Every structure is written in structure tokens, then in C-alpha cells.
Image (spheres, helix red, strand yellow):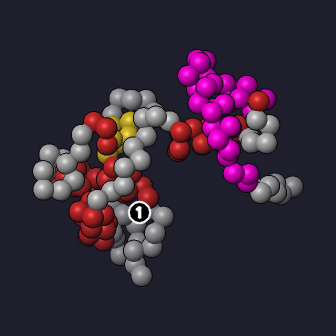
Amino acid sequence: MVKVRSKSIRFTKKADRIIIKHMKEPPICYAKIKKEIPEYTTKQIRQRWTNQLDPKLCHVPLDEYEKTLIVKLVKKNQKPNGKICWTTLIPEVEAKTDGDASGGARDDDNVLPFRDDNEVLSRLDILCQEALKYDFLQ
């Protein structure tokens, strides 16, 4: 049996407020939140929180230096088959941007914590993840 995906419904400000309210009250239970906003699935609610509403997220746009650097490094680290060696690319990006006052220097407000909060994911790391969505061989 093929599962048919229903049309997604845009989140309202009211739904966002409900999600934020519940996320401040541990334990977090997406099923409990869904009871208040049944038009969304528990997966949609979780993704809305982790991708948009979490106050730990950095929504500051990347600057031109960061964008240019990541595109160059992705092209440099891309193998002939199109795969990108992220284990070598990410440290190279970090080495070229961290603490560099001329471009890409970031403060603690411009990083996105991993879900376990043991490491930080810089804005450039996020761009690396986004770059995976594009075909740089064109």
C-alpha cells in the first residue's frame, strides 16, 4: 500500500505560540501538542520547532565572504563522481573563518547548537549541509 502525502498546511502564529509554550514545559510531548493543533502531524510540529522556532537557531544570513568560501571549498573537495568529502571540507572552512576579523568571524549568537549541545554547528557548517542539496557539477 502506498502512503499518500497530504497537502501541507502553513503554520499559523497561533500554532507557533502553542508549540513554543509546550516546548518550555518539560517533558516535551509532540502528541500532547498535536491534541491542541490537530491539523498538523507530530512530525510537522517537531520539524517546525527544530527548523524554525527553537530560540537557539541562528537566523542571521551568511555574508558574501562565507557564501563565496563555501562554494569554492565545495567545488575543490568534490570528487569526480560528484560526492563531497565533508570530513576534510568542514575543518578547512572552520580554519579559514574562525577568528578571522576580515570575514566570517562569529560570536556566540551566530552559531547553532547541535541537539545534544556538546558541539556547535557554525553558520558555515549549516551552509555545507545546505550545499548538499545542489548539483555543483553543472
Query: Picture coordinates of residue 100 (x, y %)?
Result: 13, 51
| Residue 70 visible somewhere in the drawing | no
Q: Is residue 30 above or below residue 127?
A: above
Query: Picture coordinates of residue 116 (x, y %)?
Result: 43, 29
Asked which secondary structure carries label 1, the reply is helix
Q: Residue at x 53, y 44 (%)?
A: 52
* Residue 10 covered by magenta stretch: yes
Q: Residue at x 19, y 48 (%)?
A: 105
Farthest residue, direction right:
1
In depth, the one of 118 and 57 nearer the eye is: 57
Region of the chain picked out in magenta, as a range = 8-35
Type of amino acid at the residue the image marks with label 1:
Ala
Quarter occupied by the N terminus? bottom right
Q: Is residue 93 above or below residue 116?
A: below
Residue ID for mark 1:
131
Q: Quadrant of residue 3?
A: bottom right
Image position of 131 (left or right of 46): left
Image position of 90 (left or right of 113): left
